[in-house]
Image: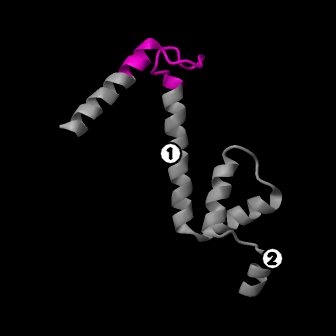
């Protein structure tokens, strides 16, 4: 049975799974790829945890973007003056900590 699985590559390796997991967030996986992804997902606890962690990161990024914390950044390609000031003061503060 295991030689059949290896011969036809019915199951992803963990590396293949992680690549497909990231890819699936941007585009739809093909039928065979979805099958291989699902089989590996059921069998591998570590990869299921990786997938959940990616879900958390995606959600956090979406929430940060939707909160529009940097005054008008949502519809603009440039940082607002207040965002620039926050970044530069944080960098200066960090530089002072490391030089002390």
Span shown in magenta: 66-86
Q: Main secondary structure of the magenta part?
A: loop
Vertical position of residue 28 compared to residue 2: above or below: above
Position of 66 with respect to 16 (left or right) is left
Q: Which residue corresponds to mark 1?
A: 56
Quadrant housing the N terminus: bottom right
Residue furthest left in the image: 100
Q: Secondary structure at mark 2?
A: helix
Task: Kindly identify the residue that appears in the image at 66 percent across and 45 percent down.
Answer: 25
Residue 31 position in % (x across, y down): 82, 58
The quarter of the displayed image where residue 38 is located: bottom right
- In this rendered view, identify the residue nearer to me: 48 or 24: 24
Alpha-carbon neighbours of circle 2 within 10 Å: few (<14), some, or many (≥20)?
A: few
The quarter of the displayed image where residue 36 is located: bottom right
Residue 47 position in % (x across, y down): 56, 63
Task: Kindly identify the residue that appears in the image at 65 percent across and 68 percent down.
Answer: 40
Vertical position of residue 13 compared to residue 30: above or below: below
Q: Which residue corresponds to mark 2?
A: 8
């Amino acid at each position: 049975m295991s030689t059949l699985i290896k011969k036809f590559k019915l199951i992803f390796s963990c590396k293949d799974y992680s690549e497909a997991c990231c890819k699936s967030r941007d585009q739809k996986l093909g039928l065979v790829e979805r099958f291989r992804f699902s089989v590996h997902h059921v069998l591998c606890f570590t990869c299921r945890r990786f997938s959940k962690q990616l879900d958390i990161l995606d959600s956090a990024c979406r929430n940060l973007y939707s909160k529009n914390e940097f005054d008008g950044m949502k519809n603009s390609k440039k940082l607002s003056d207040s965002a620039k000031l926050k970044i530069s003061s944080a960098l200066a503060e960090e530089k002072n900590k490391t030089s002390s």
